[in-house]
């Protein structure tokens, strides 16, 4: 019975599972967004959030602790010097998991896990959007004015 | 060990299974591009979910 046992086994041995989580966490730090299965995304979330919290205080012990799990030196640097300062005011919840539906082939549930403060695609879209929205609003106003004119004319 | 006493015909099994029916998936409308999409999932057409871009769809 798995009473009170937390976490997913992901059909892997303990060492395989550990390697997988470390690898996914490293990729997430380097690329900010990873597309994987829903179960792995949720498991990565549990794995990486405490590491990010740890990285918010930059000290030698913190770096050593995190480097036990994040073995890529570049990823370690990115986590401490780029991600940590940006999430300083966020009290946890640094990642977001968005479901994408089922994969062709094996029907596996696919999801994206991303760092909340590093959604590049969305930021680019928002920069592009404000101009468009203004146009839409002015068009609507013009329509209303036209309607009012025709109403008062008749 | 207990065993079946009588042969179970294909017809019997098939008749029981007449009530096994596939259900249509729940479909909702994407608030951004108005294409049909699965509820609680990012829209496969425009990549939006909960008012923000989750991913850039292929060919966009």
Image: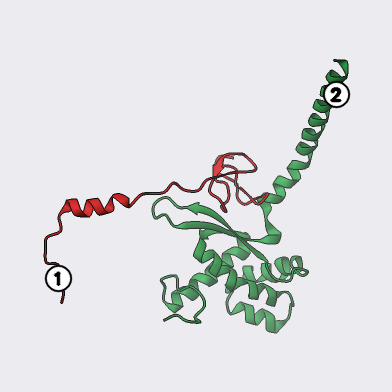
Chain colours: A green, B red
Q: Residue at x 72, y 50 (%)?
A: A123
Q: Read off the residue under disc 2.
A: A148
Q: Is residue A72 visible?
A: no
Q: Read off the residue under disc 1.
A: B3
Q: Is residue A64 left or right of residue A12?
A: right
The image quarter containing residue A34 is bottom right
Of B21 and A107, nearer the camera is B21
Task: State whether discs 2 and 1 lie on one chain.
Answer: no
The image quarter containing residue A79 is bottom right
- Which residue is situated farthest in the bottom direction here? A61
- Which residue is situated farthest in the top direction here? A154
Depth check, mark 2 against mark 1: the one in front is 1
Circle 1 chain: B
Q: Is residue B21 left or right of residue A32?
A: left
**Quadrant (top left, top right, bottom left, bottom right) of the C terminus of chain A:** top right
Circle 2 chain: A
The image quarter containing residue A143 is top right
Q: Position of residue A6 (x, y in %)?
A: 52, 78
Cα–Cα span, label 2 and label 1: 83 Å
Q: Residue at x 71, y 47 (%)?
A: A124
Q: Position of residue B31 (x, y in %)?
A: 64, 43
Q: Position of residue A108 (x, y in %)?
A: 44, 57
Q: Residue at x 67, y 79 (%)?
A: A63
In the image, residue A97 sits, relative to residue B52, either above or below, namely below
Of A99 and A50, nearer the camera is A99
Mark 1, secondary structure of its residue: loop
Q: Position of residue A1 (x, y in %)?
A: 41, 81
């Amino acid at each position: 019975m798995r009473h009170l046992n937390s976490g997913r086994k992901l059909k892997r041995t303990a060492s395989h599972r550990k390697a997988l989580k470390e690898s996914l966490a490293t990729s997430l730090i380097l690329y900010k967004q990873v597309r994987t299965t829903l179960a792995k995304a949720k498991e990565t979330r549990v794995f990486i959030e405490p590491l990010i919290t740890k990285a918010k205080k930059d000290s030698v012990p913190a770096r050593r602790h995190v480097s036990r799990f994040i073995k890529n030196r570049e990823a370690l640097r990115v986590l401490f010097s780029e991600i940590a300062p940006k999430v300083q005011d966020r009290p946890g919840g640094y990642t977001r998991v968005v479901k994408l539906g089922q994969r062709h082939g094996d029907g596996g549930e696919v999801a994206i896990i991303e760092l909340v403060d590093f959604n590049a695609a969305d930021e680019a879209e928002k920069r592009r959007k404000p101009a468009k929205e203004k146009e839409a609003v002015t068009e609507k106003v013009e329509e209303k004015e036209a309607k009012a004119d025709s109403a008062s004319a008749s | 060990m207990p065993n079946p006493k009588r042969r179970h015909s294909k017809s019997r099994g098939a008749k029981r299974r007449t009530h096994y029916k596939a259900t249509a998936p729940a479909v909702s409308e994407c608030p951004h591009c108005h294409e049909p999409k699965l509820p609680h999932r990012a829209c496969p057409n425009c990549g939006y979910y909960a008012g923000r871009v989750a991913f850039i769809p292929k060919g966009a």
